Amino acid sequence: MAQLLDPHQLEQIERDHAKGLPARDIVEIFRPLGVKLSEATFRKYVQVGLLPRSRRVGRKGKHRGSQGLYPVGAVRRINVIKRMMAEGLTLQEISRSFVCFRNDIEELERVLDTALARQLEELQARDLPQEMRRSLERAMGEARRDGKRLVRQLELIASQLAATEPRAPPADGTGG
């Protein structure tokens, strides 16, 4: 099995590329690891809903056009997809898992990030005693870590559920 990105590498990539990455750069991140991922495969993952669509971002300079940037979270998602495939799951099974759960998990991440960003803004806008400020900063850091742990746990549960088949309805059609 090819080597995948570890949590520290993923966090570093997310810090370094918070505004997003073009598909070719994401593909290049995985190449040195021996992970089979081409731009065509990347596009297929987008088409079947495993990865989010890009957003168009204009380039500086006259007549430079725009490029598609994918959320940096796509790197983490590809890592999960490749891990699930190595565990023997099909794209259909992975897709079912992502369609059922991934959008909810991503929404949770967005809500947590927004709430923490607003609280940080509010903290910075207030004139607070130093001790209180430090205490609130520690609490916010702890909340951020707890949120990341929750998201990782939900992703793990989703991948485990994707590895199982849904219960077949009863033959008599009673639904229970």
Image (cartoon, rainbow, N blue to C red):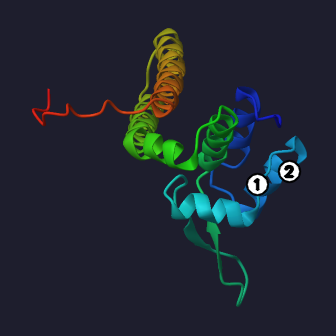
Q: What secondary structure is marked by label 1?
A: loop
Q: Nearer the viewer, residue 118 or 98?
A: 98
Q: Earlier in the sequence, mark 1 or mark 2?
A: 2
Q: Amino acid at mark 1?
A: Leu
Residue 22 makes an appearance in the image:
no
Assess whether mark 2 and mark 1 are in contact (beta carbons under 8 angstroms).
Answer: yes
Q: Which mark is residue 31?
A: 2
Read off the residue under disc 1: 37
Q: Amino acid at mark 2?
A: Arg
Q: Quadrant of the N terminus?
A: top right
Alpha-carbon span between mark 1 and mark 2:
7 Å
Residue 100, percent across and down? Answer: 38, 42
Q: Quadrant of the C terminus?
A: top left
Vertical order, 82 against 140 (above or below)? below
Q: What secondary structure is marked by label 2?
A: helix
**Is 107 positioned to the left or the right of 15 in the image?**
left
Vertical order, 70 against 91 (above or below)? below
Q: Nearer the viewer, residue 120 or 129?
A: 120
